[in-house]
Image (cartoon, rainbow, N blue to C red):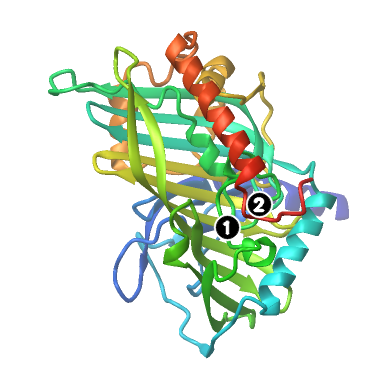
Amino acid sequence: MKYILTILVLSFSGVILAQEKLDSLSAVVRDADTGEPIPYANVYVSAICGTLSNDDGEFCLSCLPSETISIFCIGYQRVSYRASNLPAVISLRPISTTLKELTISRGDGIIYQMVDKLQREAKKHRRAASQYFFRMAMRYPGTDELAEAFLSAKSCVQIRDLTFHSGHRGQLRNDLLEGPSLTGLVRTNMHIFLRLSPVLVNYDIWNATFVPADIVFSKVKNLYELSCVQMTEEDGTEISKVRVTANPTILSQPILDGTMYIDRKRNRLLRFDGQVHGLQVILYDQSREQHFITGIDYSMHVDYRHDHGFTEIANMSGVISKDSVKVRLLLYNLGDKKLTFRKSVRVRDNMMSAIDEAGIDSTLWIVNNIVKRTQEEERIAFKDSTFWSANKSKYNTPLTEKEQRTNQYLNEAIRQLMDNAMPLRRTFKP
């Protein structure tokens, strides 16, 4: 009788499991007070199932109807829903419990303790790496572009050493536009913006840029003005919202400022919203003539995770803008969802050529709808018939003599800057 009952129970369980199928769900996340969409909110089901809301606050994912979906964003109250009851609009309420507003100075311990902890983590976990989904959408005169890829990178504290595994690109051209038609960010490498961080552990191209950690390291006094507001999340976590504002007299060279969200008791960096002004990028027209665009604004958003025992980049987004040129970057940590790749191409001087060389593994894109595209991104992807196929590289052509001279000049200028005019005293490089 026990044997028969066991068979019946197992059979009945199998029927229930067979009946429960994955649902494809979508919703939009909004601020409960303003109604504005909340971009890059975390949507979590499990360590291998989750996503982010896109720039329009929208997300989609597939999960079982019985699973629980949690939606959270620093500064907002977390909400959870059974998948079968997920509403079309999810309203998040800002955390309203403010303990007190503090005035902090250069010598305040919270900054020193955080920087010291991140440095120690970077030494201990300098080889730690994660797999990421990457998206870049570009709009500039005459052309819209979209690139998506899977990559891996060292992920402790700061993104570095990017390796692409699979990717594809799409492009929409307006050949009727008057004036020079720019052919894209051919010789510029937007992936360098992913390496920027409030605490640099590998300086690279950002050597001459001040960042919030230079409150500790720099010999230059009064780089930033500091203010702090403390608030408490529902689970009792005390968060210090530290605003780091660049001193206007220092803005003659690139300087990153913004807001850091710090778990004060556990000394953890949770999130950073920042911006850097006065940058420059170079675009090329069809005849490969350079077009310098100065006064670039770059804003960035970074969320961090700590479930692997160190501060790791969970997701990162950025917007590069100037007049009619706009570039959006997105990086999303795949967490414990490890993918197997056929090819690996390390990025050296050119991200686009690395994506082209890695090629497209269509099986990855069919089964992995990582972050929902915005309507504008969908327009580029669907109207470009080559988007789902491996493109012949447009970026592997040899450098012209003029471009080689420009690179030599820039390398020499950077060397002289570092040797003779570097005002920072940094002591750490893993």
* 38 or 203: nearer the viewer: 203
Q: What residue sits 45% from the left and 17% below the top?
A: 403
Q: Position of residue 277 (x, y in %)?
A: 41, 52
Identity, as a three-letter code, of the amino acid under mark 1: Val
How many numbered badges does the structure rendering display?
A: 2
**Residue to which mark 1 is pinned:** 211
In the image, residue 280 sits, relative to residue 54, either above or below, namely: above
In the image, residue 393 sits, relative to residue 169, either above or below, namely: above
Quadrant housing residue 426: bottom right
Q: What residue sits 64% from the left and 54% below the top?
A: 46
Q: What residue sits 58% from the left and 62% below the top?
A: 212
* 376 or 144: nearer the viewer: 144
Q: Position of residue 319 (x, y in %)?
A: 40, 47
Label pair 2/1, CB-CB below 8 angstroms = yes
In the image, residue 86 sits, relative to residue 327, either above or below, namely: below
Query: Taking the image as drawn, is residue 41 in sight?
Result: no
Relative side of 324 to 308, left or right: left
Under circle 2, the secondary element is loop
* Dot 1 crowding, Cα within 10 Å, few <14, some 14–19, many 20+: many
Give the quadrant of the N terminus: bottom right
Question: What label sits on residue 200 in the rendered view?
Answer: 2
Give the quadrant of the C terminus: top right
